[in-house]
Structures are given as C-alpha cells and as structure tokens.
Image (cartoon, rainbow, N blue to C red):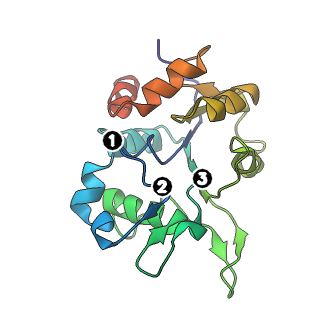
Amino acid sequence: MLSELNNIKAVVLDFDCTITKEHTGGRAAGPSFLENEYIHNNTKNGFSEFIRGAIRRQWHIYIATYGDDSFAWNDEEVAGHALIERYMQYHFGRDQSVFRSPERDGEGTITKYHNVIAKFSGDRKAYHWSLIFEQLKNQVQAHEILFLDDDEGNIGYAQEAGCQAVVQGSKEHAALICANENVFELLNINL
C-alpha cells in the first residue's frame, strides 16, 4: 500500500533509476545523451505531472543524487548538477526555477546548496540529508518528508531519520516501486 500523501510537506527524489528509466552513471557521455528525445525517453512516466502536483501542494522539492560533477571524463560530457539541470530544463523550460543548482565562487567551488544536491558521498546520502534537514529546519519535520529512491540502503537511512518511504515498513518493496517506470503515475493518483 502506498504511503498517505496528505501529511507530506516535502519530497526528496533520487535521480538515477528513480527519475530516470535507465541509469546514467551520473553523466551524459556525449551530446546524444542530452538530446530532448533521449531525455524524454529516459524520464519515467508522469514525472513532470508529479512535480507540478507537488508544487500545487506547496511541497519543498529536492533532488539528492550520487551523480557527481566530477563524473565528466572529458569536455563533451555533462555530469552531476549540470546533467540534472539539463533534464529539468527539458521538463520545465530553460528558465525553470523549481530545481536550483548550488551557488559557486569564481573558482567553481560550491558555496551554497539549494534543492539539487549532486555529490558522491557514499554514505547512504547522509551528506545530502544533512543539507536538506538544515534547509528545512523549523519548517518541516522528518516524518513529513517523502523519500523516493530505488536503493534499499538509502531508503533505510531515510526511514531511520524518520522520513516516509513510498511504502512504509518495507524498504525492499519501496525500492522496487521507485524503480518502476510508472512510480510517478501511481503517486499522481493520490495528488
């Protein structure tokens, strides 16, 4: 049974195999992987509608991914924040402001995160959660956050922190549902 969405105030989404159908490895290995048709075909059904529903409900929205900026191996590749930005621009327009990449100084070092966190932390996303909880402090409690991820370990960590999964009580079942290409269509029924 899917979690009840009425008490949710924020949603945190994994990128690879949660928003996307196929795993990108955190990078687009050439221009063909950035074409509109590829992005369209690699995004799960109902994703845009789900985000629009979350906006209507005034949820805080985050993307937390291990896809790191350093995953680009050459100048033709796009990785991490830039890859997510390209996907979100496809879905919500070039001037979209729903998903915001971090601020950087003149040397490219991140000085402030917003709602897109792309970092290979390897810690069940504890790094990501620390930034998200800091940003949501005094606005949203952990039990009011819905976490969508296809990885059981990441879901387990989020549940230990008090967050909701798409299926309560079974991180395995929640991960399977999040991996399904129709996960957003299932959730849209409840929005």
- Read off the residue under disc 1: 44
Indicate the quadrant where residue 114 lies.
bottom right
The answer to whether residue 81 is above or below residue 179 is below
Of discs 1 and 2, which sits in the foreground?
Answer: 2
Can residue 5 be seen? Answer: no
Direction front: furthest residue: 73
Q: Residue at x 33, y 41 (%)?
A: 44
Disc 1 marks a residue whose amino acid type is: Lys
**Callout 1 secondary element:** loop
**Callout 3 secondary element:** loop
The answer to whether residue 112 is above or below residue 171 is below
Residue 53 drawn at (x, y percent): 40, 38
Disc 3 marks a residue whose amino acid type is: Tyr
Indicate the quadrant where residue 145 lies.
top right
Residue 94 drawn at (x, y percent): 36, 70
Q: Which numbered disc covers residue 66?
A: 3
The answer to whether residue 103 is above or below residue 92 is below
- Read off the residue under disc 2: 25
- Real-space Cα separation, disc 1 to disc 2, in angstroms: 16 Å
- Real-space Cα separation, disc 1 to disc 3, in angstroms: 19 Å
Q: Are marks 2 and 3 in contact (CB under 8 Å)?
A: no
